[in-house]
């Protein structure tokens, strides 16, 4: 539950507290807890059910709340929405939290405006888009949602406002000191829109007919009103009663009462009055309590009252009409049979409003939300409107990379965003990290000293991994710094070649460039015997980097020619008009094969080679794009066999990174802006424009989650995923700077 909570004094706080308690009581198997909104600069002594506090105006605390909910694998979040309790224009800070959530959202709307302003409309539109179910407390509320905000009827649940189960009326008048008198009651937090002055204005006429009448005004001044205006409204009411000569028949109880006290006052009341002045009000906890407790009610015709008091459950009077109030009070007090019949009709309505019944209805709504969330992916407002527009590129943050890096190198895996030392290190990831640092060095960052230190650490790992006798690299190392293999994979060797070539071409440090060049030459001969197409591709990308610095080096050029022609021949043997691909299956890091042909063919002025790279990349871009225009890489859970189904999940960050890099190289090779659009689509996959509409980039840690499953993201933030995100981001930023 997300909303206000007692001891904060407001109707939303009472509602959230009561609903959470009722759900916990009715469904003991559920762990129901609360995230409480705090006024600026205020803290409250909350009960244990409140496990997280959000400062209304502090936007980062909303993001922390989203992380808290995601990490605790919550099944459903139920939001109690009122514009005024959240920060930002029209409470827009709430949306920052909800956009990050991985679970279905059920939102209870306590206010729905018939004529919202632009900010209110925008917030409500997105809120209802983000919510799997929307709960309203009246038919009027449901009609407003459909008419003003285009919310489909099947998404709306009508659940009445809850009320406590009240005990049979006892000698409450005696205990309250009003025995023998007719009691009119109004309760709730005081504010100028309550219209209580009009009941006081009606008292002279009421007392003339029924001298035994007393009017009880029960409730403290609303805290926000008190902060701004002090007790001006209450003092005005007291002065008004004194001026009219009815102050002896008006009792003010200036406090926020408990359920037990409220029960006493309701039991003592003969008539309950809500003289509210805002006719668009779609709910009222005080009116719900009065009707549910079987009281005769007189009310102004605001939306909620018109619906709840229909069919003889109460009486409606015009707003600001003291004479009408007096007339109806006198009539009800003078006709016991009429008043008791009205009470009976109200009590019958109240049986469906007690908290246990309401709690069951809410749990039904939660189950619907979970079911529909599993069957269809939530369509977020921001995604549907911004999917075709380039996203703002985030800043380059190395926080999580530093967290994964120790004095040896970068660790492979993480539990959430905490490094897993037991999994040790690998050349694959340290080569990726070295490449990332070369790209960072190339574009420049403020903390150059940290970049230099990290670059040296990753290069030292790559150097240590190289076995000069075999001309090959180790790959896996334990946390205790023992090599776990005699010889690493061809792919890991190719990735090391790519990183070393980038160091030679991009590093600003002469020492790293020299060492990188030595290792590059020492490891290059082994590539001639490779059989892995991806190892060929990684090596070709490394050669392309190296030749940026030493383009006339014939030995390296010769290896490039040999490997690129092998890759081209592989395509020519295996491709067909309906399968323009290199192999019988499209598996992992697919775009790197196309990219290697594009950059190599461009450097060698081999147009047929470039054409094959572009053709295969275009096909890959097409099969990895949904009908909604989102990037959807081939999943690792089955890949994409020729003539078979394409695996939709698990989607991996290395695929998005490869597509970003390859399509940007295609754009540079052709000057065609459509390739840049493909790159932007693939990059936005990291930011949430994907099948689940869920960000893989974690703005809190600076890391990237490990993959996209059918129903969730993999919350672990390992090296491969984080480095894939960073490389893609650096490539996008570099391309943007070139255009600028």
Image (tube, grey):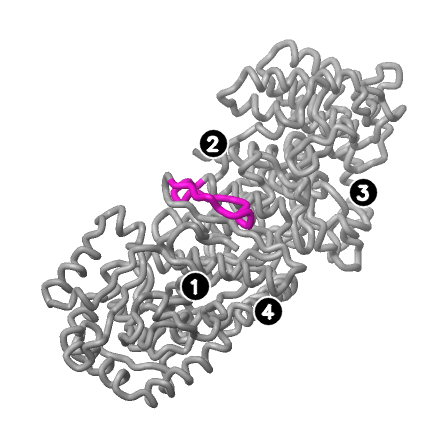
Q: Residue at x 58, y 58 (%)?
A: 104
Q: Is residue 520 visible?
A: no
Q: Disc number at residue 737?
A: 2
Query: Which stretch appears magenta?
Result: 42-59
Q: Name above or below for residue 120 compared with residue 559.
A: below
The image shows residue 377 at horizontal and vertical percentages of 60, 60
In the image, farthest residue toward the left? 243
Q: Main secondary structure of the magenta part?
A: loop
Please name the residue that numbered disc 4 is placed on: 364
Please name the residue that numbered disc 1 is placed on: 109
Q: Name above or below for residue 88 compared with residue 298.
A: above
Residue 101 or residue 234, whichever sits in front: 234
Q: Is residue 94 visible?
A: yes
Work out whether mark 2 precedes mark 4 in sequence or the reverse, and give the earlier one. 4
Q: Judge the density around disc 2: few (<14), some (14-19), many (≥20) Cα neighbours within 10 Å.
A: few
Please name the residue that numbered disc 3 is placed on: 570
Work out whether mark 2 precedes mark 1 in sequence or the reverse, and give the earlier one. 1
Report helix, strand or loop for mark 4. Answer: helix
Image depth: mark 3 or mark 4 in front: 4
Q: Which image quadrant for residue 487?
A: top right
């Amino acid at each position: 539950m997300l909303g206000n909570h007692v001891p904060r004094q407001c109707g939303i706080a009472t509602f959230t507290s009561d609903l959470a308690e009722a759900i916990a009581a009715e469904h003991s198997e559920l762990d129901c807890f609360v995230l409480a909104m705090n006024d600026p600069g205020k803290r409250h002594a909350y009960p244990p059910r409140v496990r997280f506090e959000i400062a209304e105006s502090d936007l980062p605390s909303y993001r922390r709340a989203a992380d808290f909910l995601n990490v605790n694998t919550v099944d459903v979040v139920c939001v109690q929405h009122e514009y005024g309790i959240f920060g930002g224009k029209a409470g827009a800070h709430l949306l920052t939290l909800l956009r990050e959530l991985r679970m279905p959202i059920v939102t209870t709307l306590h206010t729905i405006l018939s004529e919202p302003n632009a900010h209110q409309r925008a917030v409500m539109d997105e809120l209802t888009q983000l919510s799997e179910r929307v709960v309203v407390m009246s038919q009027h509320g449901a009609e407003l949602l459909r008419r003003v905000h285009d919310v489909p009827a099947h998404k709306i649940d009508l659940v009445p406002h809850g009320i406590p189960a009240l005990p049979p009326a006892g000698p409450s008048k005696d205990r309250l000191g009003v025995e023998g008198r007719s009691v009119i009651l109004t309760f709730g937090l005081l504010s100028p829109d309550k219209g209580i002055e009009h009941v006081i204005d009606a008292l002279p006429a009421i007392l003339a007919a029924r001298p035994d009448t007393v009017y009880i005004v029960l409730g403290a001044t609303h805290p926000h009103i008190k902060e701004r205006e002090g007790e001006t409204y209450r003092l005005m009411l007291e002065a008004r009663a004194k001026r009219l000569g009815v102050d002896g028949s008006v009792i003010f109880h200036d406090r926020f009462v408990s359920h037990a006290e409220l029960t006493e006052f309701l039991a003592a009341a003969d008539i309950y009055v809500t003289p509210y002045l805002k006719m668009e009000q779609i709910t009222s906890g005080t009116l719900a309590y009065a009707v549910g407790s079987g009281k005769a009610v007189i009310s102004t015709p605001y939306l909620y009252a018109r619906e709840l008091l229909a069919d003889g459950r109460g009486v409606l009077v015009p707003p600001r009409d003291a004479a009408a109030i007096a007339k109806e009070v006198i009539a009800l007090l003078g006709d016991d049979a009429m008043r008791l019949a009205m009470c009976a009709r109200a009590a019958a309505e109240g049986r469906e409003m007690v908290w246990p019944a309401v709690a069951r209805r809410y749990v039904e709504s939660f189950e619907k939300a979970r079911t529909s969330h599993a069957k269809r992916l939530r369509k977020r407002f921001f995604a549907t409107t911004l999917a075709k527009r380039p996203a703002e590129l985030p800043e380059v943050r190395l926080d999580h990379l530093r967290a994964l890096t120790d004095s040896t190198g970068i660790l492979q895996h993480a539990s959430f965003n905490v490094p897993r030392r037991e999994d040790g290190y690998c050349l694959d990831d340290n080569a990726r990290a070295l490449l990332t640092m070369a790209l960072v060095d190339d574009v420049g960052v403020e903390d150059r000293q940290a970049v230099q230190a990290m670059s040296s650490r990753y290069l030292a790992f790559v150097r240590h991994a190289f076995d000069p006798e075999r001309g090959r690299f180790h790959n896996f190392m334990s946390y205790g710094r023992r090599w776990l293999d005699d010889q690493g994979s061809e792919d890991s060797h190719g990735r090391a070649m790519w990183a070393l070539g980038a160091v030679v071409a991009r590093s600003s440090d002469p020492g790293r460039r020299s060492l990188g060049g030595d290792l590059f030459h020492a490891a290059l001969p082994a590539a001639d015997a490779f059989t892995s197409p991806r190892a060929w591709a990684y090596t070709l990308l490394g050669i392309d980097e190296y030749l940026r610095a030493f383009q006339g080096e014939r030995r390296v050029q010769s290896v490039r020619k040999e490997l690129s022609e092998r890759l081209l021949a592989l395509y020519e043997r295996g491709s067909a008009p309906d399968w323009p691909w290199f192999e019988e299956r499209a598996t992992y890091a697919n775009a790197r094969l196309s990219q290697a042909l594009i950059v190599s063919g461009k450097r060698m002025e081999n147009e047929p080679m470039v054409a094959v790279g572009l053709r295969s990349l275009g096909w890959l871009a097409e099969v990895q794009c949904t009908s909604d225009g989102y990037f959807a890489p081939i999943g690792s859970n089955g890949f994409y066999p020729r003539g078979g189904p394409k695996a939709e999940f698990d989607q991996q960050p290395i695929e998005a990174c490869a597509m970003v890099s390859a399509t940007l190289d295609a754009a540079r090779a052709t000057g065609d802006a459509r390739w840049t659009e493909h790159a932007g689509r693939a990059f936005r996959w990291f930011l949430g424009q994907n099948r689940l509409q869920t960000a893989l980039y974690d703005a809190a840690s600076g890391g990237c989650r490990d993959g996209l499953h059918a129903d969730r993201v993999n919350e672990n933030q390992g090296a491969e995923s984080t480095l894939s995100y960073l490389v893609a981001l650096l490539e996008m930023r570099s391309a943007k700077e070139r255009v600028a």
